[in-house]
RNA sequence: GGGGGCGUGGCGCAAUUGGUUAGCGCAUCAGAUUGUCGAUCUGAGGGUUGCGGGUUCGAGCCCCGUCGCUCCCGCCA
């Protein structure tokens, strides 16, 4: 017999009864009855109950066995009597009656408690410091396994579509635009630095120039930017994709088939939107949902009612409209009977996210009530009801501000209503594409800048850049969104140098500045680049959605904390004087950061 | 860089809002217990309330500073 297990802790069933087996695993739980003891033995695959009878010489020793110790038990698989079957356990029909028991490794008391409720976890820094223990929890085992399966499925789906998986460099050069780079000093070239790629963007475009036609990679990306609950600091993985000779619709169709198929595969009973996913132009999304990553599970659509207030007696809104602002209406069905406190709370919420106020009207018993009702004529109310498609029992909330602010606030109120009224179906994955992002926008000082990706192809090409108002030009740029989570951004790339120069000129860059900054790209584009485009869905976020987690660290085996520290490995850390000398690096830290102990 | 929240035995929490010796559950240790399944019962040990200062007769609680964690804004082409 093998020294360790012959079976896993999750596989024995009634049909295995009276077979001699050997199981290895961790002491998960222990129930000591003095002259009879039960040990729940756990491994990656499950839990099996081990019975220790009083006549065994290792009985006393088992009483001293600590949780999370590793043991190997040999014995006969035994059917449990009808009244002792555990229906909650896949192996609950049987138990292993121990004949031999070897303690492979006794564990000390663990700093985090694993035998309790799986949702009752300790503080996150402690979990991260002892991640190897935290990962033993069944939920984490499931999440990390799910991640493995998702990556494997994505890889298969991409290969089936004829994409080539190609590795691109990890040590590359610093890129002038975008996020902060992580720099790596070069020993052979003192004073020079590599940078870790923020994304393989340039390489994948160069692969298209190289004629590789369809590329993908499960690509690590490195950005020295601050974290969020759904954004891991430092590093993350994306399904990096680029395709040649495509129009926008070709990319959308390919990617939605991969994502749609993937989500169906791992949906576990949840519904997934059918293909094709809804396409929503950016401007429409900002109006209807107040966001470029709308959660379409919330059945509320914002509408514009600025014109109806332009003539009204409600000065607060009318004056905003006269100054060029807007009024947005947020209609919600069948909540007229909510108590006053509900409406007060919504007003308070709107103010907390920066609104001056939140108006509302309640259609009830043939009347229209609410704080702003008295300012509106019979005709105003009739038109509002028609525009918002509301009737008796319904409520409409109003936000008024300059367009961008009003959109944002209305969007936040929409989401808050969805949450508080429990309108979000947790058992559905609702996708959409946001398309037609604006190419340019104005910054705070009024200058025209790129609003998203400077390397996207402007819709209308050179003609649009030369003749249109820059702010009206759209880009072939798209995001895919699921349940309010932005999974990915992509674009048809600008592969024509002359259009690049022109686009950068509009954003305030001289020709020489563009040449200096993007020489490598312009150089490659001199030699016949194919038209191409791509996208890069975030793997961590996909797994997060499928695992029904709201924190991205729950689907990463060894994540860093919000301050980009690895609490377990203690990274980043000081390095030795010798290492620095070899690299010709001298530290010059500000006083408050200058700790001794290199 | 800015804002909010949190910090009390190994872990999770409490302390009637400034008042006796800082409690409870889990874990740990000892004892009891032959069908449990997050076993149960009895008992014991374990605390500089993150750190420093201040106010007060008296501070876990109030004030100032500082450190740590977390969420958000900025940032993430």
Image (cartoon, rainbow, N blue to C red):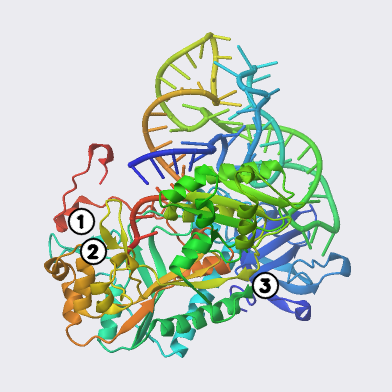
Q: Which residue occupies 38% across, 63% down?
A: A235
Task: State yes or no: discs 1 and 3 in contact (Cβ < 8 Å).
Answer: no
Label 2, label 1: how far apart the Cα atoms are: 43 Å
Q: Is residue A509 left or right of residue A82?
A: left
Q: Nearer the viewer, residue A144 or A562?
A: A562
| Residue A595 coordinates in the image, percent (x, y) | 27, 40
Are labels 2 and 1 assigned to the same chain? yes
**Of the image marks 1 and 3, the number of the one nearer the N terminus:** 3
What residue is shown with label 2?
A: A507
Q: Is residue A42 visible?
A: yes
User: Which chain is disc 1 placed on?
Assistant: A
Are labels 2 and 3 assigned to the same chain? yes
**Of the image marks 2 and 1, the number of the one nearer the N terminus:** 2
Find numbered disc 3 in the image and state the secondary structure of the residue it sits on: loop
Q: Nearer the viewer, residue A12 or A217?
A: A217
What residue is shown with label 3?
A: A10
Q: Is residue A181 visible?
A: no
**Of the image marks 2 and 3, the number of the one nearer the N terminus:** 3
User: Which chain is disc 3 placed on?
Assistant: A
Q: Which mark is residue A107?
A: none
| Residue B46 coordinates in the image, percent (x, y) | 59, 33
């Amino acid at each position: 017999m093998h020294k360790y297990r012959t079976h896993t802790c999750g596989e024995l069933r009634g049909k295995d009864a009276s077979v001699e087996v050997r199981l290895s695993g961790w002491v998960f739980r222990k129930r000591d009855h003095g002259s009879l003891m039960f040990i729940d033995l756990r491994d990656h695959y499950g839990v099996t109950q081990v019975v220790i009878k009083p006549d065994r010489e290792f009985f006393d020793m088992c009483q001293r066995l600590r949780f999370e110790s590793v043991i190997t038990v040999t014995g006969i698989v035994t059917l449990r009597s009808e009244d002792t079957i555990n229906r909650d356990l896949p192996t609950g029909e049987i138990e292993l009656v121990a004949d031999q028991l070897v303690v492979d490794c006794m564990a000390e008391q663990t700093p985090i408690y694993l035998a309790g409720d799986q949702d009752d976890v300790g503080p996150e820094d402690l979990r991260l410091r002892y991640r190897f223990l935290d990962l033993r929890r069944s939920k984490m085992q499931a999440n990390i396994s799910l991640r493995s399966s998702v990556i494997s499925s994505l890889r298969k789906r991409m290969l089936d579509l004829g994409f080539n998986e190609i590795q691109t460099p990890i040590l590359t050069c610093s890129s002038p635009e975008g996020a902060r780079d992580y720099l790596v000093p070069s020993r052979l070239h003192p004073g020079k630095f590599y940078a870790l790629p923020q994304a393989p963007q340039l390489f994948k475009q160069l692969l298209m120039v190289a004629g590789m036609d369809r590329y993908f990679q499960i690509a690590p990306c490195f950005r020295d930017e601050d974290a969020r609950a759904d954004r891991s600091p430092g590093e993350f993985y994306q399904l990096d994709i680029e395709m040649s000779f495509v129009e926008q619709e070709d990319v959308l169709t390919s990617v939605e088939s991969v994502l749609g198929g993937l989500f169906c595969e791992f949906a576990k009973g949840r519904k997934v939107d059918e293909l094709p996913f809804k396409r929503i132009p950016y401007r429409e999304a900002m109006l209807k949902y107040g966001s470029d990553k709308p959660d379409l599970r919330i059945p509320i659509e914002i509408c514009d009612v600025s014109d109806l207030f332009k003539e009204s007696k409600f000065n607060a809104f009318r004056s905003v409209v006269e100054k060029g602002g807007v009024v947005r209406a947020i209609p919600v069905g069948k909540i007229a009977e909510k108590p006053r406190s509900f409406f007060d709370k919504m007003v308070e919420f709107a103010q907390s996210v920066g609104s001056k106020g939140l108006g509302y009207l309640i259609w009830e018993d043939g009347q229209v009530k609410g704080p702003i009702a008295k300012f509106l004529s019979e005709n105003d109310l009739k038109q509002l009801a028609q525009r918002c498609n509301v009737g008796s029992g319904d409520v409409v909330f109003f936000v008024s501000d300059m367009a961008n602010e009003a959109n944002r606030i209305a969007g936040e109120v929409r989401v808050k209503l969805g949450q508080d009224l429990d309108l979000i179906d947790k058992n559905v994955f609702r996708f959409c594409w946001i398309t037609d992002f604006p190419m340019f926008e104005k910054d705070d000082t009024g200058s025209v800048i790129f609003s998203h990706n400077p390397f996207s192809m402007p819709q209308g090409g050179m003609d649009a850049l030369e003749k249109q108002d820059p702010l009206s030009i759209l880009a072939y740029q798209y995001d895919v969104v699921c349940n309010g989570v932005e999974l990915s951004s992509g674009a048809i790339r600008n592969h024509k140098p002359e259009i690049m120069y022109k686009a950068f000129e509009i954003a305030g860059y001289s020709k020489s500045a563009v040449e200096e900054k993007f020489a490598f790209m312009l150089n490659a584009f001199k030699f016949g680049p194919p038209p191409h485009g791509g996208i890069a869905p975030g793997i961590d976020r996909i797994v997060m959605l499928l695992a029904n987690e709201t924190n991205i660290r729950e689907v990463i085996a060894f994540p860093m904390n919000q301050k980009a520290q690895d609490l377990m490995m203690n990274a980043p850390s000081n390095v030795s004087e010798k290492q620095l000398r070899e690299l010709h690096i001298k530290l010059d830290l500000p006083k408050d950061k200058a700790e001794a102990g290199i």
